């Protein structure tokens, strides 16, 4: 080794050894540690002085120690510089018994006839996390390409984000209207209490982060202002809000939380979460675009089928019915009755075909209309409730009610049916949608057990109320005489 005469080689090597970001550990053939650089403390929680004289197996997970001893003996028989465990996921054991992903490079040294080996040990958590992030995004993409709905994808995103960020809780809030956000996916112990919670689209932290496009680190969610109510119950401390954005499409905000007392989110955690959220959001947008293209093909075919049914089959059946009706009007007795019965049967067939047209999978919500959407929800809960709701429209509701009100009304109707299915034991359900000037009133009535004493407003009732208030309306639940309950939801038609 050539070195300047002005440099003390021992001091230089000692400085390099002490400054190495990797933990450097030197062992002899008996596997005892002779030297350990200061970096071992941040990696393994031992000081270098504590490790000197210890067997290197101290730093090896318990279930792999015996195998490591065999590998070390084989290595000293034919020592050469190489990476350790190529193709394997290596782990080191820390003082507290926890394991940490590591990468290890080995360099043999022979001094005065004695063999030694220097192990350069590097923290591999971020490298492993990057690989896991790619796997998670690939899994999300695979589900999207398989045609999974957004409601099935977002829980996968929150779960992956929570695990990859070493967090206790994760949730995603998305905009539902100009006035509120909704927490639509959660993951982590106890986070179910957050699902469905409504947040202000103007003042909530989730909305602010999505609008700004900048992540926000929270030191203590427990004491922070402007966070969801359920966060207090979860006992969370450090928090991280990350915009869920792909290009110019703002899908919402991803929120991560750790237990109180755990380490704050560091810049590398923020960068990692931003990359993951961006990749996941991009995958969702791309998947949605693909599904829209496929849907366009389905819609085109369904529209052709619907057009053929309406323009040919229905018209021919209608003409046949008119002809039979004209003939039957001049015939009395049993034959005339049979003709009248046949005409009624044709009317039923025409109604069934029209219902089939509305229910074609490719038909859009606009083509189905509010009435058809409500009929479909009634069918959805038929098995759970045991009775199909009777739905009545009073006035030209579908032509005057805004799309936003329609969307919220369907959510309220489904929430109401869900409550009836769980609690009411009803034998009859009536749903009335009526226009009263500039207002629309939705009433859902049942003859079940009614409102019990001590009933508290859960998330469902609170969400229905929030949806009404976001339009400047009201929501009430009252008892019905002689039994049952009445849900009244009243909002302006054009809000």
Image (cartoon, helix red, strand yellow):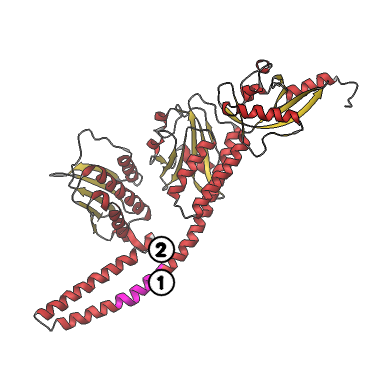
Residue 110 position by quadrant: top right
Could you tell whether 461 is left or right of 69 in the image? Answer: left
Observer able to see residue 343: yes
Within 10 Å of disc 1 (Cα), the crowding (few <14, some 14-19, many 20+) is few
Please provide percent x and percent y for residue 363. Answer: 39, 63
In reply to whether residue 314 is colored magenta, the answer given is yes
Q: Outermost residue toward the left?
A: 333
- Over which residues does the magenta segment extend? 302-315
Helix, strand or loop at disc 1?
Answer: helix
Observer able to see residue 203: no
Please provide percent x and percent y for residue 252. Answer: 48, 44
Given residues 70 and 65, the one toward you in this image is 70
Residue 435 position by quadrant: bottom left
Please provide percent x and percent y for residue 468. Answer: 32, 45
Q: Which residue is tagged 1?
A: 304
On-image quarter of the N terminus:
top right
Residue 330 position by quadrant: bottom left
Within 10 Å of disc 2 (Cα), the crowding (few <14, some 14-19, many 20+) is some
Name the residue at 50% across, 52% down: 144
Q: Earlier in the sequence, mark 1 or mark 2?
A: 1
Residue 362's disc is 2
Given residues 275 and 199, the one toward you in this image is 275
In reply to whether residue 120 is colored magenta, the answer given is no
Could you tell whether 313 is left or right of 8 in the image? Answer: left
Residue 129's disc is none
Given residues 163 and 464, the one toward you in this image is 163
- Magenta portion: prevailing SS class: helix
Please provide percent x and percent y for residue 270. Answer: 57, 36
């Amino acid at each position: 080794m050539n070195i300047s005469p002005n440099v003390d080689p021992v001091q230089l090597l000692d400085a390099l050894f002490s400054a190495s970001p990797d933990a450097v550990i030197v062992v002899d053939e008996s596997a005892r540690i002779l030297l350990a650089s200061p970096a071992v403390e941040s990696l393994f929680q031992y000081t270098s002085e504590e490790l000197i004289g210890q067997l290197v197996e101290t730093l090896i997970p318990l279930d792999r120690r015996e195998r490591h001893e065999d590998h070390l003996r084989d290595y000293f028989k034919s020592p050469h510089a190489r990476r350790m465990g190529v193709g394997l996921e290596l782990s080191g054991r820390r003082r507290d018994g926890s394991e940490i992903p590591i990468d290890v490079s080995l360099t043999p040294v022979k001094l005065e006839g004695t063999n030694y080996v220097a192990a350069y040990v590097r923290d591999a958590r971020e490298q492993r996390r990057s690989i896991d992030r790619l796997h998670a995004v690939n899994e999300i993409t695979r589900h999207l390409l398989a045609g999974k709905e957004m409601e099935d994808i977002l829980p996968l995103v929150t779960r992956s984000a929570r695990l990859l960020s070493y967090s206790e809780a994760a949730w995603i809030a998305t905009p539902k209207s100009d006035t509120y956000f909704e927490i639509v996916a959660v993951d982590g112990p106890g986070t179910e209490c957050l699902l469905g919670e409504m947040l202000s689209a103007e003042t909530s932290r989730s909305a602010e982060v999505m609008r700004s496009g900048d992540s926000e680190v929270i030191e203590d969610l427990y004491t922070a202002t402007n966070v969801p109510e359920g966060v207090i119950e979860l006992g969370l401390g450090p928090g991280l809000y990350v915009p869920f954005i792909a290009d110019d499409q703002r899908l919402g905000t991803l929120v991560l939380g750790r237990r109180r007392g755990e380490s704050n989110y560091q810049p590398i955690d923020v960068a990692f979460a931003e990359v993951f959220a961006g990749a996941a959001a991009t995958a969702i947008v791309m998947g949605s675009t693909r599904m829209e293209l496929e849907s366009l093909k389905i819609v085109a075919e369904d529209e052709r089928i619907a057009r053929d049914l309406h323009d040919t089959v229905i018209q021919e059946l209608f003409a046949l019915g008119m002809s039979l009706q004209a003939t039957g009007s001049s015939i009395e007795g049993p034959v005339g009755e049979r003709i009248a019965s046949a005409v009624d049967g044709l009317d039923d067939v025409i109604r069934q075909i029209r219902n089939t047209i509305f229910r074609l999978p490719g038909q859009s919500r606009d083509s189905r209309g509010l009435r058809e959407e409500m009929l479909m929800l009634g069918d959805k809960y038929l098995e759970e409730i045991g009775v199909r709701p009777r739905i009545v429209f009073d006035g030209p509701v579908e032509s005057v009610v805004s799309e936003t009100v329609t969307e919220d009304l369907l959510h309220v109707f489904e929430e109401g049916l869900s409550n009836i299915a769980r609690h009411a034991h009803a034998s009859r359900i009536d749903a009335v949608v009526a226009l009263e000037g500039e207002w629309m009133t939705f009433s859902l009535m049942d003859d079940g057990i009614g409102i019990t004493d001590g009933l508290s407003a859960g998330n469902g009732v609170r969400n229905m109320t929030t949806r009404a208030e976001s339009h400047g309306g009201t929501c009430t639940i009252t008892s019905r005489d002689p039994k049952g309950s009445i849900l009244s939801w009243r909002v302006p038609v054009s809000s």
